[in-house]
Image: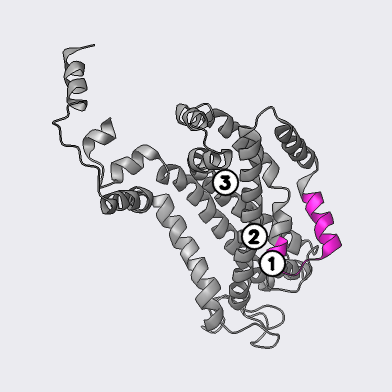
Amino acid sequence: MTETDELDFEELFDDDTEREPPSRSARLKRTLDLTVLAPLRIALHDWRAVVAGTILLLYGLMGTVGVWLATKPSSGDYPKLQGPFQELAYPLGTDLYGRSILDQIIYATPDMFRMIFAGAVVAVGVAAVVGLLSGFMRGTAIDAVLMMLADIIITIPGLPLIIVITAIFQPTNPYVVGVFLGVDMWPGLARTVRSQVLSIREESYVEASQIMGLPTPSILRRDVAGQLMPFILVNASLTSRRVIFESVSLYFLGILPFTTYNWGVLMNLAYQENALTRSELLPWLVFPMITIILMSFAFVLLSQAMDAIFNVRLQARHAETIDEEEVTG
């Protein structure tokens, strides 16, 4: 032990040294700074987060304010097969039935968000619970049963499974469609979460909680799940992208009933009218496709930006309540 270490040790246990614990307001301020403000500062300095946030904000406005401003599409609203960028009333043109293509895209957006929400919650929620329990109870009967269930679902081809389920139940509610789509997405993520938990459960602070006799749910919630939240949120973003593709595919193939507006329905109708060979019908097919690609691109950028947003060192560097010495250690 060096002389400096001895001095620090003496200072640490010196009764004369005044060490007041931080006040409650200071702790709240520090927590707010570390969990909200610092990630927000990182996001504002990351072009991927800015671009993704801007795109998703536009979609959000389109799905909320847009449906109030746009006219609900119906046959004969406007002249048939009008080209894009000719009239303000139908800026993306009209389809074979005289409906504005932009209005149809806008009215399909709220249901798409509902499917994304339901699908992501089911896939990521089930994967997180199964992965946490299985990893923390490694070698037990619970671990064996959960992983056997995951392996069984993994071995079943995903898209055919969803086609069979949706063909049997013919769901019309977008939340139910999202739940069905999430059925085949959780097993792979559950296995990845389990492998992360196997590593975290060996950490000293987890072992200390076990030695102190804390209940398992408390350890899972405070010590394990907290460490996995960034990983889970990144996968939630990627899962959302997958829900978009699968839902649009099912509507395009005509497997889901055409009871609601959907970008896949637009593409299906355009394709059935030979839009690939008729130039006047191409906007009917192309603009929904661009809408899907743009939203998917936003979720990809968001998942990449989350790697930086949830980086602990970057958060400490952008936090105003942590000084330079604490950051450099």
Type of amino acid under label 3? Asn
Type of amino acid under label 2? Ala
Type of amino acid under label 1? Pro
Alpha-carbon span between mark 3 and mark 1: 21 Å
Where on the picture, by quarter, is residue 99? bottom right
38 left or right, relative to 152? left
The residue range painted magenta reads 159-177
Instruction: Point out residue 56 in the picture as x, y percentages from the top left corner.
Output: 49, 62
Q: Secondary structure at mark 3?
A: helix
Alpha-carbon span between mark 2 and mark 3: 15 Å
Q: Secondary structure at mark 2?
A: helix
Q: Nearer the viewer, residue 25 or 60?
A: 25
Residue furthest to the top in view is 1
Q: Is residue 279 visible?
A: no
Badge 1 is on which residue?
Answer: 174
Q: CB atoms at circles 1 and 2 under 8 Å apart?
A: yes
Q: CB atoms at circles 3 and 1 under 8 Å apart?
A: no
Badge 2 is on which residue?
Answer: 118
